Image: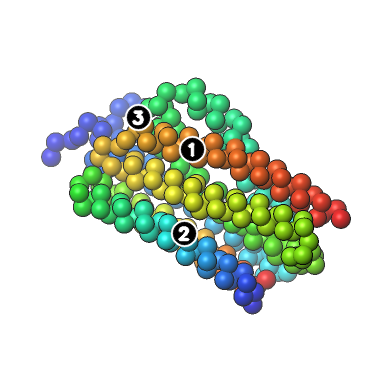
Amino acid sequence: MNVTALLAVAAFALALLAIFGTLYVGAVRSHRRGDLGIEGIRILRWAIAGQLVIYALLAVTAFLG
Amino acid sequence: MTAVPEAVARPGVPARDAASGLPPYTARLLRWSFAIGVLPPLALIAALAVKSLYLLTFVHVICGGTWTGFDLFMGLVMTRVMTLLDVPTRVEVAKRLTPTTFFILPSLAAVAVTSGIYLSQAEGKFDLGSPWILAAGVVVLILTVQGFGIFMPNGLRIFIELAKRQPDTTKIARLNMRNIRLAGVQAALQVAIIVIMAHLAVY
């Protein structure tokens, strides 16, 4: 197992979650104010989940490299 | 319920979701982007699983080349085209460009870098004392910071703005132009990294 690669992917995934999480919280606030439709929140969740799937696949490579 | 004007489909103009400003094709383009975006990591998994140096090299070159080519196109061609468009038309381009590239570009970038590290390790070139490897690392670090700090958050901000009942079209156009211009900067850095890669491949 390539520990360095696994840690790097985990660090990138956490950075992504931190940045996207902040934007998501802002979007949820907009939704509560009535500025943003629920479809927008769903799309955001989908976008964040999709990015995490790509990072999960990259994490798999750490066990093969 | 009274239909909002945006929800009424006009010929050639897709209907918008009545509950948000998102056009119905956004989810479809995102799904397409995701379907393409998972291919590079899957190809990298395959290359490592079968322990094929040839396939690993292919994955690295095709991902790096496509990423560079895309950024060159965005920086050299799309900036020229976009600056000639009015704001509403730029927004229409952003509505389609952002979801289509949302998964593909980060995936290409991540796999190009990851496969490059595996490749340099496999060829015994991953020497952190080498100025060429260090130079590659510095360029990759700048590209990564730009990607995480500017590109992806801007993409998400465009989605959020598009999903609002009253989207700020000026903000969408500004964020999209910022991403396209930044792609030009990324292209210049990628040309620099290709110079480094060519050196590492030959010497």
Write the residue at 24% across / 50% down.
A31
Task: Bin the neighbour count of mark 2 within 10 Å (Cα to Cα): few under 14, some 14-19, many 20 and up.
Answer: many
The amino acid type of the residue labelled 3 equals: Val
Q: Do the dots labelled 2 and 1 sit on one chain?
A: no
- Kindly report the distance in space between the C-alpha atoms of the residues bearing marks 2 and 3: 34 Å
Q: Nearer the viewer, residue B151 or A61?
A: B151
Q: Amino acid at mark 2?
A: Leu
- In this rendering, do the residues under marks 1 and 3 share a single chain? yes
Taking the image as shown, residue A62 lies to the left or right of residue B198, namely: left
Question: Which residue ends up furthest to the right in the rendered image?
Answer: B203
- Location of the C terminus of chain B by quadrant is bottom right
> What chain letter is assigned to the residue under label 3?
B
The mark found on residue A16 in the picture is 2
Q: Residues within 10 Å of mark 3 (few under 14, many from 20)?
A: few
Instruction: Kindly identify which residue carries mark 1.
Output: B178
Q: Secondary structure at mark 2?
A: helix
- The three-letter code of the residue at mark 1 reads Arg
On the rendered image, what quadrant is the N terminus of chain B found in? top left
- The residue tagged 3 is B13
Mark 2–mark 1 distance (CA, rounded to whole Å):
20 Å
Residue at mark 2: chain: A
Q: How many marks?
A: 3
Q: Residue at x 45, y 37 (%)?
A: B176
